[in-house]
Image (cartoon, coloured by chain):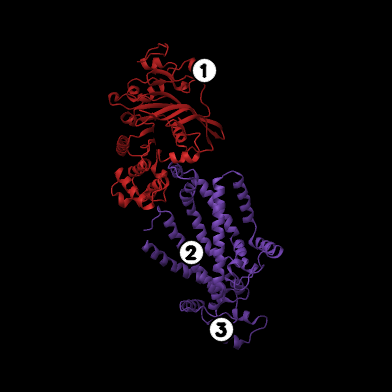
Amino acid sequence: MSTLLEVTDLHVEFRTRDGIAKAVDGVSYAVQAGQTLAVLGESGSGKSVTAQAVMGILDSPPGRITAGRIAFHGQDLLTMPERERRAVRGARMAMIFQDALSALNPVLSVGHQLAEMFTTHRGTSRKDARAKAVELMDRVRIPAARQRAGDFPHQFSGGMRQRVMIAMAIALEPELVIADEPTTALDVTVQAQVMDLLAELQREMDMGLILITHDLGVVADVADHIAVMYAGRIVETAPVHRIYAAPAHPYTKGLLESIPRLDRKGRELYAIKGLPPSPHHVPPGCAFNPRCPLARDRCRTEQPPLYEVAAGRTSACHYWHECLHGTRDSGTPEGAGR
Amino acid sequence: MGRYVIRRLLQMIPVFIGSTFLIFVMVYALGDPVAALFGDRAPDPATAAQIRRDLYLDHPLWQQYLHYMGQIFQGNFGTAFDGESVLSLMAGAWPLTLRLTIVAIVVEAVVGVVLGLLSGLRRGRTVDSGVLVLTLIVVSVPTFVSGYVLQYLFGVRWNVVPPSVSPGAPLNQLILPGIVLALVSLAYVTRLTRTSVAENHRADYVRTATAKGLPRHTVVVRHLLRNSLIPVVTFIGTDIGALMGGAIVTERIFNIHGVGYQLYQGIVRQNSPTVVGFVTVLVIVFLLANLLVDLLYAVLDPRIRYA
């Protein structure tokens, strides 16, 4: 298993009228070939901005990458000339956007938009590209693909539109697909179909997948690893089955407890108190401290590093031990938590 | 689509009748054309009555209108008081104006869209502010000022083009008048394109196009500009009619004997058949231009479908 993508200490700033907002503040994560990394977090946690930085489609200005490294197969994308970068974009890594209705061009037929992938990257003739577009639509199981290739995005249902979006992303069999909340804009019943399709295609093509979501329910079935983000930083990383059993960060724990569960029927649903901080005014120390049930003086002054709590598990909480085991033991992090 | 076109064509009939009747009333209400024909001298009553009979002027206005319309559809636009048939005036004037309009439209569309695109892509930068100031100046200066100034500079001072257009009005001589005619609309096209491009620049589908790895020019032209031009095309389309009828000042400055010139002459000399005839054709041009815009709209934006 080789490392497909490695993001190291990425910093992204947005210069706005209210000052500089640190949207991404030292994020590191890695995706292995053929594996799925779920990036979890609330709106504004920096999960989408990180993905845009990886794709190289950050709105700049105002956005700016101030530090960090994004290595794709060991090669740093940030120092790569734009020409080479463009050859990677779309062909070797692709992105699926949240709202297919606005993400697809309203005045071009979906067949044209799909064919564009082949004509641009492969130099395919228009006619052959069109045939391949129809094949793709078949592959994502859009009924009557041949007839529908000439249709425009607004003529498709939400689920079918998202399938077009997926078809566009997998067109050139990329090694990495970034799906930015791919099911958020869809009906619940359609969500499952789209997720299943995505998982199936991933298996078939052995793609690495970064699944950006705020929906813990979606994550459980498809992800291998999870990275939880809060206020521009990663607060916890873990293999997916471990995090559900025993979260090592109070924020993750709060998220898990706020999912409605059948065995807690009738009881009041837990909610994390307070609101996420504005990126202009991130509190000192641990950014989560004003909302954290475990917060102490140390949390308000000292920013926690990512402690290694187990093999392949990290947590950015001074008191991760307490969170993981439910004790007030603030013992040394090394070697614990197994 | 076919049914839509037919419906639109049928809708044009009442508009056509209404507007031509209004013009007819206004022109004939202005004064006594027979008196105008005689100038300062008082006409001999018997001769005047004879002329009135010959010109159908002794009938009530609505009968005159019906008679006039009937004649028009037989291809007879009447005779100007100086004896020349209006149709032959038109045959001389329309081709000139049409050519002038085409030059103006091309200038307006090409320069306006390019300037608008540049400033829209570089919002808030020097290019954008420069274009903004430029368009404001152009909009504020009336055509008779910009026309005479450019005519003096290019035609007299630097001698680049002849200061007035020769009777045949070859295309190369129409470039300067075309620019003058286009100037104000050009500024509007620029502003409209700029706003539209700036608005769509951050659109999700533009980001998608970039994420697909398309080269920058493809993203800008095929995805961004294509969407941004929809309102611009509407404006340019409706402007066709305005440019044709509104060339009076430009045609006078550059001595082009087109529609504007003939209309002006017709009004000054109270030559009613000329005025009504030319305006009637202008009304038709306006109506057809609007229909064209509506149809073009559906081609450019597939979200609009006509039932």
- Note whether residue A249 is visible: no
Give the residue furthest to the bottom. B46
- Of the numbered discs in the image, which one, if any, rests on residue B289? 2
Q: Residue at x 55, y 35 (%)?
A: A16
Q: Which chain is purple?
A: B
| Chain designation of label 2 | B
Q: Residue at x 44, y 41 (%)?
A: A87
| Chain designation of label 3 | B
Q: Residue B29, image x and y in percent?
A: 57, 74
- Of the numbered discs in the image, which one, if any, rests on residue A301? 1
- Of the numbered discs in the image, which one, if any, rests on residue B52? 3
- Looking at the rendering, in which quadrant would you find the N terminus of chain B? bottom left
> Which amino acid, mark 3?
Arg
Contact between labelled residues 3 and 1, with CB atoms less than 8 Å apart: no
Q: Residue A288, image x and y in percent?
A: 46, 23
* SS of the residue under disc 1: helix
Q: Residue A61 is drawn in which quadrant?
A: top right
**Which mark is first along the chain, 3 or 2?**
3
- Note whether residue A30 is visible: yes
Marks 1 and 3 belong to one chain:
no
- Looking at the rendering, in which quadrant would you find the C terminus of chain B? bottom left
* SS of the residue under disc 3: helix
Q: Residue B256, image x and y in percent?
A: 61, 70
Q: Which chain is red?
A: A
> Which amino acid, mark 2?
Ala
How far apart in space, not on screen, are marks 2 and 3 (Cα)?
37 Å
| Chain designation of label 1 | A
How far apart in space, not on screen, are marks 1 and 2 (Cα)?
70 Å
How far apart in space, not on screen, are marks 1 and 3 (Cα)?
102 Å
